[in-house]
Image (cartoon, helix red, strand yellow):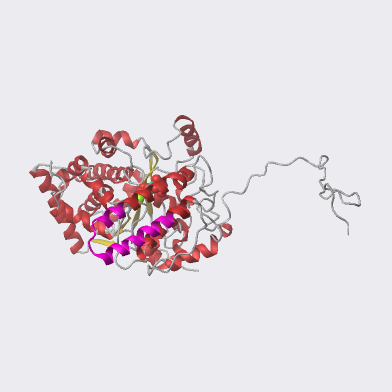
Amino acid sequence: MSTPNNGVLSSGAPSKVTLSLGHLPSKKDIKAPWPRTPTRVDPNNPPWPAYRGYHEYSFAHATMQSRLPTILGKAIEDATRTLNDQSSEEYVVDLLACIERMGELMTDLSGNAKLRPLIDDGEADVALWNKEIAKYFQGKDFMNAPWLFAEAYKYRRLHECFCTSKFWRDYDVFYRQKCDTFSRSSDAVFELSMRFAEPFKLSDNLSPEEKLEAERLMFLELTQVCLWGNSTDLSLLINMTEEQIKALQSTGGDHLAATEKNILGNHLPALWKTVKELRDKTGGRIDFVLDNAGFELYCDCVYADFLLQSGLATQIHFHGKRYPWFVSDVTRKDWEWLLNSMVYGQLFPKATDQELESLRRLGRRWKQYVKEKKWVYEQHPFWCTGYTYWNLHAEAPDLFLHLSRSDLVFFKGDLNHRKLTYDCAAPASTPFDVAIGPMASSAGAPKIVSLRTIKSDVVVGLGAEGDETAEKLDETEPGWKISGKYAVVLLSEGRPGEKVRFA
Ligand code: F6P
Ligand code: MG
């Protein structure tokens, strides 16, 4: 048998053949066909290129590499603080095991481990998670899986640390922080409660046209209150001072007029037309897919209260998360905490008696709405999965059917927007209806509005000139996509009234 020697076989033939292609036509700059055709789209292959943690210098990278370990580190500190307050040995030992599991998660995250299936910890979403991992993410790690999935997976693994325990299944490592944002938002909280403590009433001296105009203006201002309430999410505000938070939360009229300029994709006029038509049809059901607890939830409730009082809606459904999610998202406990603290809490020692009374009245009215089922709080398991909303129709048909009965569904915040748009590099000029795919095109899709301050890479719905707008901002304000300074208010056409069909 002949032995290779210095890359040359004993016969004299080279071990590796390199052909010279100098006489063939030169390579063409072939553009990949974006968006992918729908049959080639799946969670690992979004319609436009996915953001992934290994893209250095991206926000995805900064999040996976630094922000998530920092958030997890603070979560461990929180659980340790709770541990030190315990007296029962059973409880201490059980919590210690949770903290050890968090340590293992930290090792996996910082060591960029492969994404393993979830342990069956009794949660309703285990099957959904493990199906997605098995079908699309086998062998993927935290950095090379799409950013959205990897980030969501981290929060699910964090929940697993507690969900496999005996006494700490419902423990929320972010609860202290969430409660804190509300108590640190006193100026903005009372600014709104002093105006809305009493049900609003338009002067009887106004003509019907003047009344409608007054309502329109109120609607536009409150939609903005609800929108900008999203700029203060805890995962990004870890290092902000109280003064900086106050500046972000300012709700004064002039401030709002000025901030409308920062709404880069602005469907506010169409939104007003939609809700007005709803009232003409005797009012309907409006849904809020909630984002953050504390101050943002408070703004959502002020807005929902106005929608009810003005007859623009007759019932509101609020959708929250089943467990701690992306630091600041609303769980049932946060929802109840807000309403009860408004009525019974002692959170604002410096407030005047009038201010405190205004908050109590508002809280009592909201609790009454809950009793009368005018406000309904829900928490479907699908909201805490790694799936985007392109998969909602297929993976959670019951939820899709439920939403299809709504007249208008508000999706609050950045993460919901990422999930609506598959969190991929779609051009900024992409129309919202195209970017949200089946959530606009499936039979029975409700009208959807995304109220989102821009805090991550995906940006769509900026109109025909959108690509130029985005390019200009890239040049002049490099951090514009993560600062929360800009926003979008985007409305889909929907296909309400069409019979919902499932494959
Ligand atoms: O970690 C990044 C992120 O997921 C971004 O989408 C956003 O900046 C933040 O966390 C969550 O924002 P929101 O609470 O508005 O969904
Ligand atoms: Mg959030």
| The stretch drawn in magenta includes residue 84 | yes
Q: Is residue 500 visible?
A: no
Please tell me which residue is depicted at 46% across the width and 41% down the height of the picture: 463
Left or right: 29, with 165 as reference point? right
Number of numbered labels in the structure image: 0
The picture places residue 416, in percent across and down from the top left corner, at 39, 52
State yes or no: residue 319 in magenta: no
Q: Quadrant of residue 124?
A: bottom left
Percent across and percent down for residue 38 are: 56, 57
Above or below — where is 428 with respect to 405? above
Which residue is more in the foreground, 181 or 87? 87
Q: Position of residue 434 (x, y in %)?
A: 49, 51
Q: Which of the pair 422/286 is nearer the observer?
A: 422
Res. 114 visible in picture: yes
Where's the N terminus, which quadrant? bottom right
- Seen in the picture, residue 365 relative to 427 is either above or below; the reply is below
Most distant residue in the left direction: 353
Q: Position of residue 227 (x, y in %)?
A: 32, 45
Figure check: 249 above or below 444:
above
Residue drawn where x is 83% and y is 50% of the image: 15
Q: Residue furthest right?
A: 11
Q: Work out whether residue 240 or residue 221 is closer to the camera in this orientation and state it.
A: 240
Q: Is 485 or 125 nearer to us in this picture?
A: 125
- Outermost residue toward the front in this view: 89
**Magenta segment, prevailing SS (helix, strand or loop):** helix
Extent of the magenta region: 78-105
The part of the image, by quadrant, that contains residue 228 is top left
